[in-house]
Image: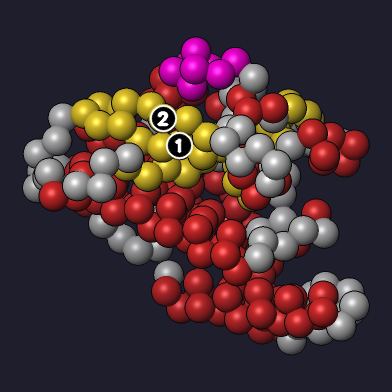
Amino acid sequence: MQEIQKSIKEVRQVVIKADQFNHKRFQILDRGQKKILSQAEQEFANIMQTLTDEAKEAHRLFSFKPVDPGFFDRPKWISTKFQLTLWCEHSRVPLPVLNPNNPKQGVYELTLPREWLVKAAPVLKTIFKTLSIIAPVAASGANLLMDDAAYEGVKEELDLAQKSLNLSSSGGGSKLDLQTNSDAPKLSMGDEIRAEGSVLRVFQTKLKEKDPGFGGLIRVQNQRREFLWVHPQFKDEY
């Protein structure tokens, strides 16, 4: 996992330099870099396809972090408040990056019970690990690249989300712990993740009650007739 992230970060630097010299993105990548980028894109496509049913009524991509700075010193917490950030499923970028004039749009505070996080961990860990792989070059296909400050903020939030899930499921020695203790995204667990999708739908219902407009995201369909939730600026891509 760390090696993949390191390689993707190197691809990011090449893409940034290409932009500076007005080169077309990715044409100057070597074969190995293109392969790594292709694998990352495929991993993202796999998780999105696995959660196709969950996209019908609500979006699937988000990150979160605990609001309380002392959260990680409370290993026996029962419920706590998290700051949750929605992502565009086209550009794979958090909404605050796409809405610089309204950075609070698509950002919420929700109180989540530990029990729910434990149940949702297989799905959430896969989502967050996949996002952490593609984040360095997120939005590349949309002619948009996060600057370093935005990228570091996104990376920190994804790291905190992973750490929160690890704390939630620690100490149980349960089947869940065995499923989620690997560093690699478990995209081979597609059937199991799909089965756990119902837990994600419970969360989507809570989010819809909080904001029926999902931060301004628009539901579209791609060529395979699959639903995606995208920022309005990408609506015409579909």
Q: Which residue is at the far front?
A: 101
Determine which residue is flagged by label 1.
Answer: 84
Indicate whether 202 appears above or below 160: above
CB contact under 8 Å: marks 1 and 2: yes
Query: Which residue: 41% across, 37% down?
Result: 83
Q: Residue at x 42, y 24 (%)?
A: 203
Mark 2 crowd level (few <14, some 14–19, many ≥20, 10 Å Cα): some
Q: Which residue is mark 2?
A: 109
**Where does the image place residue 24, in percent across and percent down from the top left?**
89, 74
Q: Would you identify the image quadrant in which residue 17 lies?
A: bottom right
Q: Is residue 206 magenta?
A: yes
State the image coordinates of residue 28 (x, y, percent, origin top left). 81, 84
Q: Nearer the viewer, residue 73 or 198?
A: 73
Which secondary structure, mark 2? strand
The earlier-in-sequence mark between 1 and 2 is 1
The residue furthest top is 209
Amino acid at circle 2: Glu
Query: Would you say residue 51 is visible in this rendering?
Result: no
Label 1 neighbour load within 10 Å: few <14, some 14-19, many 20+: many
Image-based side of 40 in relation to 175, left or right? right
**Percent position of residue 217, x then y:** 69, 30
Q: CA distance from mark 1 to mark 2?
A: 6 Å
Q: Residue at x 14, y 35 (%)?
A: 77
The magenta segment: 205-212
Per the picture, the main secondary structure of the magenta-coloured stretch is helix
Up the image or down, 109 lies above or below 121; here it is above
Q: In the drawing, does residue 181 fall left or right of residue 214?
A: left
Amino acid tagged 1:
Leu
Label 1 sits on a secondary structure element that is: strand
Image location (x, y in percent) of residue 213: 64, 19
Residue 213 horizontal side relative to residue 234, left or right: left
Q: Is residue 205 left or right of residue 31?
A: left
